[in-house]
Image: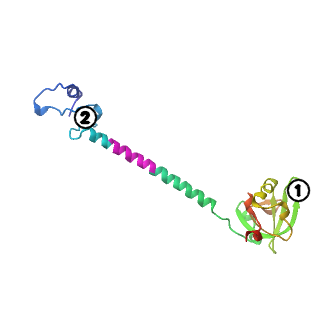
Amino acid sequence: MLLWPEIFRVKYGAFSGSAKNMVHKSPVFRPKDFDENYHFWSSKSISDLSFERLHMELKKNLLLIVCIFVSLAGLVFIYFSLTNTLPPELKISKIDPSLNGKLISTTGKITYVRTHTAGHIFLTLSDGDSKIEVPLFSSLVNHLSSNGITKYDFRKGKTIRVTGIVGEYKDQLQIVPRKATDIQFPDSLK
């Protein structure tokens, strides 16, 4: 085992003792070339040590790159699985208060249309057996033109498909659409 006084002698070429007891002299000698027990790695040259350090760094970087790639792939998977999930298509008669707060889709005929001075449109849809309210607030009505729909398209007797969140207002169930693409006229989809 080498001690610090011996390290000094090796570094500066001050060898004592017989040739058997001499420590291998390295062209560039640094304390970091010793392991934790201060044994000199005499069988490996400096270039071998540099290669091993480089190899270890590459392994660490490769692990980091793989971790980042797997994380990003997971996030992309989660994004697409959430955005491509279609809500269940239910008949109006099957919509009940237990669905409050859930995203659903339904199709029915417009039986009542009322416009508000603020730009809202209130619809009542029926499937023959049951009715449900569909409020279209002005912020949504203003964006319907991007979907090719005008306020004049909402007429009694026309069939409409609505996707939205089930809610209650004054003890009446309603479906509140979230965006312009939540309103569709099945006749125009063909």
Q: Report which residue position mark 1 lands on.
A: 116
As drawn, 18 above or below 142: above
Viewer can see residue 164: no
Q: Which residues are magenta?
A: 53-65
Rounded to the nearest whole Å, what is the CA distance between mark 2 and mark 1? Answer: 87 Å
Q: Residues within 10 Å of mark 2 (few under 14, many from 20)?
A: some
Kind of element beneath mark 1: loop
Residue at horizontal 30 percent and vertical 34 percent from the top: 32
Asked which quadrant contains residue 109, the reply is bottom right
Q: Report which residue position mark 2 lands on.
A: 38
Disc nearer the start of the sequence (2/1) = 2
The amino acid marked with disc number 2 is: Tyr
Asked which quadrant contains residue 175, the reply is bottom right
The amino acid marked with disc number 1 is: His
CB contact under 8 Å: marks 2 and 1: no
Residue 98 in the image, given as x and y percentages of width and height: 72, 65
Asked which quadrant contains residue 151, the reply is bottom right
Kind of element beneath mark 2: loop
Residue at horizontal 52 percent and vertical 55 percent from the top: 73
Residue 148 in the image, given as x and y percentages of width and height: 77, 61
Residue 160 drawn in magenta = no
Looking at the rendered image, the quarter that the C terminus falls into is bottom right
Q: Residues within 10 Å of mark 1 (few under 14, many from 20)?
A: few
Q: Is residue 43 left or right of residue 90?
A: left
Residue 184 in the image, given as x and y percentages of width and height: 75, 65
Prevailing secondary structure class for the magenta stretch in the rendered image: helix
Q: Is residue 87 left or right of residue 68?
A: right
